[in-house]
């Protein structure tokens, strides 16, 4: 027979009890974590969000409580009345290990089926199972700790933004579809038949309108939605710190975010200091082969194209530049390991990978017969290689206008080797501002230059005249914040002048009809005195993931979706009744089968 809670009131959390509570009468409530029956003595470990306390049931002194405890099983919900006593032999592995709760009464408030996995700190169970039974997974200490950390980070961000004069403003969840780089989630309107809302990919247009509206400093902890393929650091719905400022210089925005991140890191007992270093986009690509370089280790890239004579290039089918790096201590790599590196390089677009081993007994190279011993030496010297190092050089199979394709490939090998060789100092927290991004990128699909960011990104003043003649040389006023090789967020100084905005739209080949259809209300707003403004959006999920020491943002989201974009617990997405579809005027078309 189950008990009612009645007027029982918890006096302490289980995990909060200490030796200083000795002699107190307490009431705790939680789940049965573990049960041990020693005959006259029966022990129940009771768990709540703060931790575990050991409860003792003595058959001789409290026979009724002991008899009831014999009915209790794992994950039963209970309330215990009793007195705190000091243990004769403390358990140093428990925060409450100096005390026991000697029970006088046990209330069984609910029973439970045997869970599909143990509610323990470390469990060997598939992520899909944990997500399907997320309500059980959340009882474990690690997910709870992550969500508490996330809460404290967001709370500190809000405090920081308020202290700096920012006003939190909520923007609409149901808005219109605007092109922002990913597919929209569409919501059909019942009232306006055949028309759709879109869930926001970001509050971009609305926050700019808030600047036009004179709010001066806006921020929001906001949910955003992008219909993209899933990965470890991406979800269909995500949370970001969104902010915008009027009349800012770039350094003003940097100062705000540096203050936010220093204080957010402090919540996780991580020391970060500003100002953060800056790097140009083109330097990041050429030195690290990435637009989010991990600065916790060296192994910089070097362009070594001149080490490959024209005849060698023709034989190796090399087009474009060749980039290389020196992997310290990897000269002992086996043939199998070199083959694996080559396969990795080819899987990310390499034409070929070329190696030089600087062993103590001599220098050997896979391309010595093609480029000659002098060029092998020149290749090693260009990378600053020493005895014991392995030089890895790569060329790209295809070239893309405006990028260093081989550098991007070498950058991925750099990360793989840095991890494999143990070069990454996991105790470091390396922030970086990346600036000087190109405004346009080449689209192979459209065979034209398209906007690399959203089309409201500011243009470096002296590059304005190149919009029509040399778009690949035009730099944006965009910037990214990077931490340990992870992009935390992007932002820019915006275009606030209508004439410049129109010039950019013309450069993108957008017609007046397209502009009115996509951005009509925003273009109207620009004509009523728009102040210079700029902002940034930081990914809260990624920040929480990194500060929690996790490798996937699913570990810091209460109800995350799988890589297949499913909520296994809620069984979402799901089909809906025909009546609902009829009300919206929607018919489901049968999906076309792939051609055999």
Image (spheres, grey):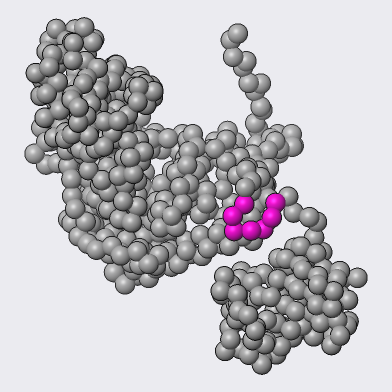
Q: For the N terminus, which image quadrant?
A: bottom right
Give the image quarter of residue 162: bottom left
Residue at 19 percent across and 53 percent down: it is 277
Residue 247 or 414: which is nearer the viewer? 414
Residue at 14 percent across and 41 percent down: it is 460
Residue 122 falls inside the magenta stretch: yes
Q: Is residue 558 left or right of residue 453?
A: right
The reply to whether residue 247 is in sight is no
Give coordinates of residue 193: x percent, y percent: 60, 36
Q: Is residue 354 left or right of residue 147?
A: left
The reply to whether residue 116 is in sight is yes
Residue 546 or 427: which is nearer the viewer? 427
Residue 132 falls inside the magenta stretch: no
Which residue, as the protein is rendered here, is positioned at the far right? Answer: 1
Give coordinates of residue 345: x percent, y percent: 34, 24
Residue 180 or 429: which is nearer the viewer? 429
Q: How many marks?
A: 0
Majority SS type along the magenta span: loop
Residue 356 or 286: which is nearer the viewer? 356
Give coordinates of residue 136: x percent, y percent: 68, 56
Which residue, as the protein is rendered here, is positioned at the far bottom? Answer: 23
Give coordinates of residue 152: x percent, y percent: 45, 67
Q: For the C terminus, which image quadrant?
A: top right
Which residue, as the protein is rendered here, is positioned at the far front? Answer: 361
Residue at 12 percent across and 10 percent down: it is 310
Give the residues in magenta: 117-123
């Amino acid at each position: 027979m189950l008990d009612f809670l009645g007027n029982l009131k918890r006096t302490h959390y289980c995990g909060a009890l200490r030796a200083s509570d000795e002699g107190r009468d307490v009431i705790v409530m939680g789940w049965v974590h573990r049960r041990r029956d020693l005959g006259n003595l029966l022990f129940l470990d009771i768990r709540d969000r703060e931790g575990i306390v050991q409860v003792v049931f003595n058959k001789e002194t409290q026979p009724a409580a002991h008899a009831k405890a014999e009915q209790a099983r794992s994950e039963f919900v209970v309330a215990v009345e009793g007195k705190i006593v000091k243990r004769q032999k403390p358990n140093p592995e428990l925060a409450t290990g100096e005390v026991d709760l000697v029970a006088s009464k046990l209330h069984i408030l609910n029973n439970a089926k045997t869970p599909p996995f143990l509610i323990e700190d470390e469990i060997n169970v598939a992520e899909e199972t944990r997500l399907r039974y997320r309500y059980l997974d959340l009882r474990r200490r690690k997910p709870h700790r992550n969500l508490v950390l996330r809460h404290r980070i967001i709370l500190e961000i809000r405090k920081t933004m308020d202290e700096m004069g920012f006003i939190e403003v909520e923007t609409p969840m149901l808005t219109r579809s605007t092109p922002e780089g990913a597919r929209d989630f569409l919501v059909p309107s019942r009232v306006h038949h055949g028309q759709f809302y879109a869930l926001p990919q970001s509050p971009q247009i609305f926050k700019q309108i808030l600047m036009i509206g004179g709010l001066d400093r806006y921020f929001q902890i906001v949910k955003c939605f992008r219909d993209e393929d899933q990965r470890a650091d991406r979800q269909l719905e995500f949370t970001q710190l969104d902010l915008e400022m009027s009349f800012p210089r770039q350094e003003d925005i940097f100062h705000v975010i540096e203050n936010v991140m220093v204080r957010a890191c402090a919540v996780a007992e991580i020391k970060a200091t500003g100002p953060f270093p800056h790097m140009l986009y083109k330097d990041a690509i050429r030195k690290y082969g990435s637009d989010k370089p991990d600065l916790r280790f060296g192994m910089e890239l070097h362009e070594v194209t001149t080490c490959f004579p024209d005849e060698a290039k023709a034989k190796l089918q090399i087009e474009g530049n060749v980039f290389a790096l020196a992997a310290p201590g990897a000269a002992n790599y086996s043939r199998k390991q070199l083959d694996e590196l080559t396969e990795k390089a080819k899987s990310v677009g390499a034409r070929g990978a070329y190696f030089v081993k600087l062993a103590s007994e001599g220098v050997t190279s896979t391309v010595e017969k093609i480029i000659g011993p002098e060029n092998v030496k020149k290749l090693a010297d260009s990378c600053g290689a020493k005895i014991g190092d392995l030089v890895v050089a790569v060329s790209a199979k295809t070239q893309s206008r405006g990028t260093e394709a081989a550098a991007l490939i070498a950058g991925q090998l750099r990360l793989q080797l840095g991890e494999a060789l143990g070069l990454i100092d996991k105790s470091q927290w390396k922030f970086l501002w990346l600036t000087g991004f190109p405004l346009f990128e080449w689209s192979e699909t459209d065979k034209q230059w398209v906007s690399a960011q959203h089309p409201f990104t500011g243009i470096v003043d002296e590059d304005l005249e190149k919009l029509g003649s040399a778009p690949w040389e035009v730099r944006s006023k965009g910037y990214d914040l990077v931490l340990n090789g992870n992009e935390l967020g992007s932002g820019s100084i915006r275009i606030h002048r209508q004439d410049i905005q129109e010039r950019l739209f013309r450069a993108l080949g957008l017609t007046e009809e397209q502009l009115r259809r996509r951005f009509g209300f925003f273009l109207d707003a620009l004509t009523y005195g728009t102040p210079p403004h700029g902002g940034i959006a930081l990914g809260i999920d990624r920040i929480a993931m990194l500060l929690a020491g996790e490798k996937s943002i699913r570990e810091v989201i209460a109800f995350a979706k799988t890589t297949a974009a499913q909520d296994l617990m809620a069984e979402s997405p799901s089909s809906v009744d025909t009546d609902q579809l009829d009300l919206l005027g929607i018919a489901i078309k049968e999906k076309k089968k792939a051609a055999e």
